[in-house]
Image (tube, helix red, strand yellow):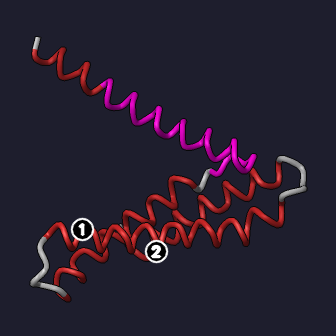
């Protein structure tokens, strides 16, 4: 019975994550009329930025409590992800606003692959 309850909870958690991803894609498509396949990769860049900065901030400010370090890293990571999204929109998506629907879709896939490849090159798995 305990395993069944745990699997129900796992299913609800996984379903909630899928719903959040779908909601994110729906909101982005509703606002800019483009399915941004690089949406998850921008979040990945924010997460990797947090991971890379947390040790640096802890070493630079050893007197700061853990929650203070997390807040600083969160703010910096959000700024990095938002800046990256802004740059992608200006460079890749805005020039294709009035083009056929297939061109922005291909560009979105290309940006996704580019960000994944750059992350693998920088953070070597």
For the residue labelled by badge 2, is the local secondary structure a helix, a strand or a loop? Answer: helix
Q: What stretch is highlighted in magenta?
A: 11-36
Q: Which of marks 1 and 2 is nearer the N terminus?
A: 1
Q: Nearer the viewer, residue 113 or 22?
A: 22
For the residue labelled by badge 1, is the local secondary structure a helix, a strand or a loop? Answer: helix
User: Where is residue 13 drawn, in percent x and y?
Assistant: 31, 31
How many residues crowd mark 1 within 10 Å: few (<14), some (14–19), many (20+)? some
Res 54 → quadrant = bottom left
At 89% from the left and 50% from the top, the residue drawn is 100
Left or right, 108 with reference to 45: right
User: Where is residue 69 drawn, in percent x and y?
Assistant: 21, 73
Q: Which of 23 and 91 is in front in this view?
A: 23
Our reading of the magenta stretch's main secondary structure is helix
Magenta highlight on residue 34: yes
Q: Mark 1 points at which residue?
A: 70
Magenta highlight on residue 65: no
Left or right, 2 with reference to 78: left
Disc 1 versus disc 2: distance between alpha carbons? 26 Å
Q: Residue 121 carries which label?
A: 2
At 83% from the left and 61% from the top, the residue drawn is 96
Left or right, 120 with reference to 83: left
At 18% from the left and 22% from the top, the residue drawn is 6
Res 57 → quadrant = bottom left
Res 65 → quadrant = bottom left
Taking 54 as reference, is 26 above or below it? above
């Amino acid at each position: 019975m305990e395993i069944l309850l745990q699997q129900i909870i796992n299913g609800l958690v996984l379903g909630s994550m899928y719903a959040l991803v779908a909601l994110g894609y729906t909101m982005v498509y509703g606002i800019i009329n483009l399915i941004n396949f690089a949406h998850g990769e921008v979040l990945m860049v924010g997460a990797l930025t947090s991971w890379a900065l947390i040790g640096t901030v802890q070493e630079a400010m050893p007197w700061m409590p853990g929650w203070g370090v997390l807040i600083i890293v969160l703010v910096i990571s959000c700024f990095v992800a938002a800046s990256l999204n802004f740059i992608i929109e200006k460079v890749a998506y805005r020039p294709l606003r009035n083009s056929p629907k297939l061109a922005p879709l291909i560009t979105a896939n290309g940006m996704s692959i580019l960000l994944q490849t750059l992350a693998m090159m920088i953070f070597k798995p």
